[in-house]
Amino acid sequence: MTTKAPTASDTRNKPVHPHDIDELLIDCEADDNQVQQAHPVLKRPWLLLLGLVFVALNLRPALSSMAPLLSEVSSGLGLSAARAGLLTTLPVLCLGLFAPLAPILARRFGSERVVLGVLLVLASGIVVRSLFGEAGLFAGSILAGACIGIIGVLLPGIVKRDFAKQAGAMTGVYTMALCLGAAVAAGATVPLSHVFGDSWQMGLGFWIVPAILAAIFWFPQARQGHGLHQAAYRVRGLFRDPLAWQVTLYMGLQSSLAYIVFGWLPSILISRGLTPVDAGLLLSGSIMVQLISSLSAPWLATRGKDQRLSIVIVMALTLTGLFGCLYAPIEGLWGWAIVLGLGQGGTFSLALTLIVLRSRDSHVAANLSSMAQGVGYTLASMGPFAVGIVHDVTGGWSALGWIFGVIGVAATLAGLGAGRSLYVQVTSEKL
């Protein structure tokens, strides 16, 4: 049995019911009881909202902007497919490796100040990636992935804390900003490189602009801070719990397919005859479609007795879209891209949903979120790297269907376990 933290007044220790799914945002600032119960009075909530949107817009462009230019970058620097695969892998790997650092930094400096500092580091990483050759390309990609991993853990907790009564609506705003940032970067990077004299360096470097704008709009929040004392909880036994691993594996495996799409889909489409501009626009459209299922899939999934059927459906849509983009006639690519977007928007949002539904209380949910993101994104990074290796060995893309199939089946099996109506069996205690 899961033991509740020893605080009678802590309303967060109630089980999370399916119909409470609007409260999806988890405080990843390491289970702060006072922060969760406090409802700060915001003097200028519109400014905070604007800052949150600008920050969220920056959590995907550094990843999705590379894909449409990957062939050009590889040709310009003489990268093999394996090294190009490593280039797409490193940022995703850093999402997982640096996620556990977020709550440590937040306790020490405060979430708002950490977000501002990391935004500035992200801007620096974009510059390094664009201007300093192959070494800078890899170093900047590592910096960008690390920054996105840290901010991605902290931002939902800030949203939940400061917009507690509008958590459902803010979840939608947060998701829309993520999708919009990824889609715009995927579609606009190649045209921007043409505007700047066919320079891929300038096309990639342009994304320093939204990062700087986000830092400017976020500065008032960093100056104000939150300033509440942290009261941490320790959760024991999570890494020994089979259900926790099933949730983590589902998060990681579906993310692996997502980052294969971010990193390699435009290159696949270019090899099939699309121009780089058209390939980027198709990826952008597929990402925009994700918004529909990312908002609807959790609501539909929580109307049944468990989430297994929903997981099977969204993963089937994802695999259908992937195989269509890889093998189907080129005339129907936009239709397959839409199917792919519907599937991947659902798989990601259900992965977040499962973290909440499989946890008895918010202390467990925060730690399960850290495990699922840290371990899951580390696992996800292997997908883009495997694609590069297979392409290097075979000289083509046809064999990638095996990678898609193996990852998709494994994700479905993990999801069938994670989708059962159960709780992880761990204990939490106040430190």
Image (tube, rainbow, N blue to C red):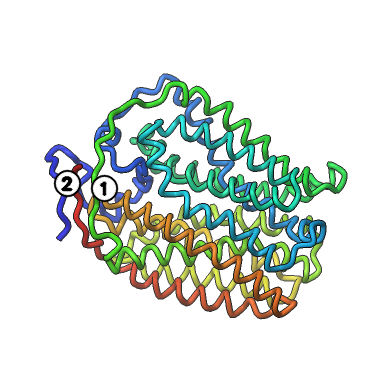
Please rate how many residues cluster around mark 2, counting C-alpha atoms within 10 Å: few if below 14, some from 14 to 19, many from 20: many
Asked which secondary structure carries label 2, the reply is loop
Of 282 and 374, nearer the camera is 374
Disc 2 designates what residue?
Answer: 5
Residue occupying image coordinates x 76% and y 49%: 133
Q: Where is residue 410 in the image (x, y as percent from the top left)?
A: 45, 75
Please rate how many residues cluster around mark 1, counting C-alpha atoms within 10 Å: few if below 14, some from 14 to 19, many from 20: many
**Number of numbered labels in the structure image:** 2
Of 176 and 120, nearer the camera is 120
Q: Where is residue 37 in the image (x, y as percent from the top left)?
A: 25, 34
Please identify the quadrant where the N terminus is shown. Answer: bottom left
Residue occupying image coordinates x 41% and y 55%: 352
Mark seen at residue 228:
none
Of 113 and 352, nearer the camera is 113
Mark seen at residue 363:
1
Nearer-N-terminus badge (1/2): 2
Horizontal side of 38 relative to 430 (left or right) equals: right
Asked which secondary structure carries label 1, the reply is helix
Instruction: Say whether marks 1 and 2 touch (CB < 8 Å).
Output: yes
List the single residue furthest toward the top. Answer: 43
Find residue 257 and report its image quarter.
bottom right
Q: Position of residue 298 (x, y in %)?
A: 40, 57
Say above or below: 179 vs 155.
Answer: below
Residue occupying image coordinates x 58% and y 37%: 121
Find residue 339 and report its image quarter.
bottom right
Give the Cα separation between the discs numbered 1 and 2: 8 Å
Given the image, on which type of amino acid does mark 2 rest? Ala
Given the image, on which type of amino acid does mark 1 rest? His
Q: Where is residue 262 in the image (x, y as percent from the top left)?
A: 62, 59
List the single residue furthest toward the front. Answer: 135
Please identify the quadrant where the C terminus is shown. Answer: top left
